[in-house]
Amino acid sequence: MEFRPIINIWILIPVFAAALVLVFIHIFRRNEKLKTNIASAVRVGLIIALAFVIMLRPSKEETSHDVFLSNLDVMFVVDDTISMWANDMNGTRMDEAKRDINYIMEELAGANFALITFDNYSEIRSPYTQDVDDVKDNIDSISVMDSYDATGTSMNTPYNDIESLLKSTAKKKNRQAIVFFISDGEITNDDKLMDFSSLKQYIKDGAVLGYGTEEGGTMQDEYGNYVYDKETNKKGISKIDEDNLKAIAKDLGISYIHVDNEHSADMRLSTIKSLAKSVATKQHLIYYTDYYWCFALPLIVLLVWEFIVVATKKRL
């Protein structure tokens, strides 16, 4: 057992010591029987002592079982423009994409993960990290953009951020870059799809995952209202553009997969996992288990007891 104080120990000691002294002075100055004062002092003293121990944060160092950490840097590039909220899949396209990302992360456990999203602009929401919870929180936080702010979709928007993260992987020894480009491929501004082939040299594997159908689906904005086509004044229909997605996949040297069920990417994942297994390394992960709750339970009991005493006798 060791202590990892929430506040510096040299601050805790004088603060709690002063509190203990002041409480005892108050109790023994009362015009009460000695027995009553001693009982009060014991109760309050235990409350202060337990609070002090909790603030010391008693913990036990634990060493995990051997785990395998792969050499993979897995990047998710996610289109979060309004068209990705079209409802022509099991829920919206984005709902399906989020489920797939979580599934891929579980299948590639031990890798470093990064998240890039793009709409009007591109953003690196999570640089490469082992903190899976942080990446998942950022994925969960993706929400439909304000339809009034939308300036049209371009597949070119995330190029610089993709290049930046790929180059960071290239600088590391024995790291393999895996890219999952997630989009419906629809371009709604006047941009011409750029050539992504200069990024191919940095990528080991991955896939372009296409979401949506040829029939398309309607979209709702952040307020739940349908998005309308400004030219026809009818509900806007977004359709997957597989030509753009296939072109990006070809440039990057990775597979194109049209997502139609939750295991669409399994074939690629099998290949990617084989890359990780060939270079996996063992590490011991040290973490701490907190035991403050063991002292919190008796503290709560004493506080309730003291509350009852104060309430009935109207004194400490």
Image (cartoon, helix red, strand yellow):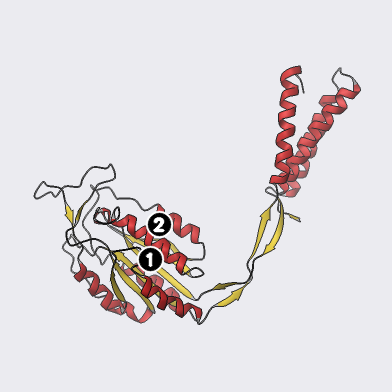
Q: Is residue 44 above or below residue 209?
A: above
Q: SS at mark 1?
A: strand
Residue under label 1: 76
Coordinates of residue 54 in the picture (x, y in percent): 71, 45
Q: Which residue is rendered at x = 28% and y = 74% of the image?
A: 249
Alpha-carbon distance for marks 2 and 1? 10 Å
The disc placed on residue 16 is none
Coordinates of residue 119 in the picture (x, y in percent): 28, 58
Q: Residue 270 sits in which quadrant? A: bottom left
Q: Which residue is rendered at x = 23% and y = 65% of the image?
A: 185
Q: Residues within 10 Å of mark 2 (few under 14, many from 20)?
A: many
Amino acid under disc 2? Ile
**Residue at the left extreme of this rendering:** 232
The disc placed on residue 139 is 2
Quarter of the image with the N terminus is bottom right
Q: Residues within 10 Å of mark 1 (few under 14, many from 20)?
A: many
Q: Horizontally, is 64 left or right of 87 in the view?
A: right
Q: Which residue is rendered at x = 27% and y = 53% of the image?
A: 85
Q: Residue 117 sits in which quadrant? A: bottom left
Q: Is residue 295 above or below residue 138?
A: above
